[in-house]
Amino acid sequence: MTAQILDGKAAAAAIKQELAERVAALAERGVVPGLATVLVGEDPGSQWYVAGKHRDCAEVGIASIKRELPETVTQEELEAVLDELNADPGCTGYIVQLPLPKHIDTDRILERIDPDKDADGLHPTNLGRLVLNANSPISSPLPCTPRGVIELVERNGISWAGKHVVVVGRGVTVGRPIGPLLTRREYNATVTLTHTGTRDLGAELRRADVIVAAAGVEGIVQAENVKPGAVVLDVGVSRKVDPETGKSRVVGDVDPEVASIAGWVSPNPGGVGPMTRALLLKNVVEMAERRS
Ligand SMILES: Nc1nc2c(c(=O)[nH]1)N[C@@H](CN(C=O)c1ccc(C(=O)N[C@@H](CCC(=O)O)C(=O)O)cc1)CN2
């Protein structure tokens, strides 16, 4: 048996088409959403992601603003850029591309973003709202990758209700926020968060109906630890240089053999990555709709 594919490119294309209609409806009311990106340094991966975000904006009719700063930028200089974006009426939402250089205090940066312009849903107020508003519809931006994971699964006709989800990795963009989201009544999943301190990762994985692998460790999810028929989402990104071509390519957390055991797998690339981008646009459109 070979697993069915959770096609992130197709789902993202459908979401973008739906958003283009909502952006056109906003334009009729004189509202143009505007996303700004803040990129520090010259990491090729981050440059690629940010360029993709601007292409996506153009595709659906969202205006976009680019702020690029050198690797040597100081905490104060970076915070001054955020203060400008917080005050700019043309910028209805923005993101600071992560990771930031080591000398920058990332938590302080995320706290500096106006929570009403926090297109990534990573400001403490918005992460707090995710936890607090457990029984009412959320009306604040949510982290894009967890949202993308949820939508990718649902758009393939799979329900989260009653599923035991094992998340691998406790990073701020995926591992930490996905538990509070999936355990909301509207999804009703049960979530185990695993990390480098987990005593027996294999045992946890073998109990999972759904695995969300977001550790950034190549092949951390092996076929022998996957329950037959499970849904496996590969969110991990490691870069590997091909010794023959000298070119760098993305490798995920999920070993390719898993496809012979699982019921569904998300490819990487082509799975959760495009969904992260699409759900960022959805956050921006929803923020503009709430304001108008
Ligand atoms: N401020 C943020 N920083 C980061 C986030 C985030 O959500 N907010 N997530 C990641 C990077 N990221 C978006 O910013 C992102 C990652 C991957 C993709 C994507 O489409 N990947 C492609 C493959 C790309 C490749 O070959 O390199 C895919 O999966 O098909 C989009 C966005 C960390 N930083």
Image: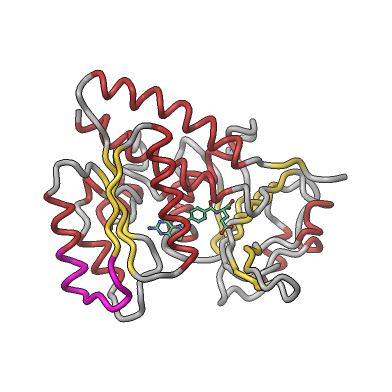
Which image quadrant for residue 241?
A: bottom right
Residue 136 showing in the rendered view = no
Quadrant placement of the C terminus:
top left
Along the line of sight, which residue is nearer the eye, 225 or 144?
A: 144
Check the image and report above or below for 103 versus 235: below
Check the image and report above or below for 214 versus 116: below
Quadrant placement of the N terminus:
top right
Along the line of sight, which residue is nearer the eye, 284 or 63?
A: 63
Q: Residue placed farthest to the front in the image?
A: 245
Along the line of sight, which residue is nearer the eye, 94 or 131?
A: 94
Number of numbered callouts drawn? 0
Q: Residue at x 47, y 52 (%)?
A: 178
Q: Residue placed farthest to the right in the image?
A: 1
Q: Position of residue 233 (x, y in %)?
A: 63, 51
Which image quadrant for residue 34?
A: top left
Q: Position of residue 103 (x, y in %)?
A: 30, 81
Is 238 on the left-hand or right-hand side of 225? left
Residue 192 showing in the rendered view = yes
Is 91 on the left-hand or right-hand side of 134? left
Which range of residues does the magenta coloring cover? 69-80
Q: Position of residue 283 (x, y in %)?
A: 36, 40
Q: Residue placed farthest to the bottom in the image?
A: 103
Q: Position of residue 127 (x, y in %)?
A: 33, 53
Q: Quick check: is 51 in the magenta stretch? A: no
Q: Residue at x 63, y 55 (%)?
A: 234
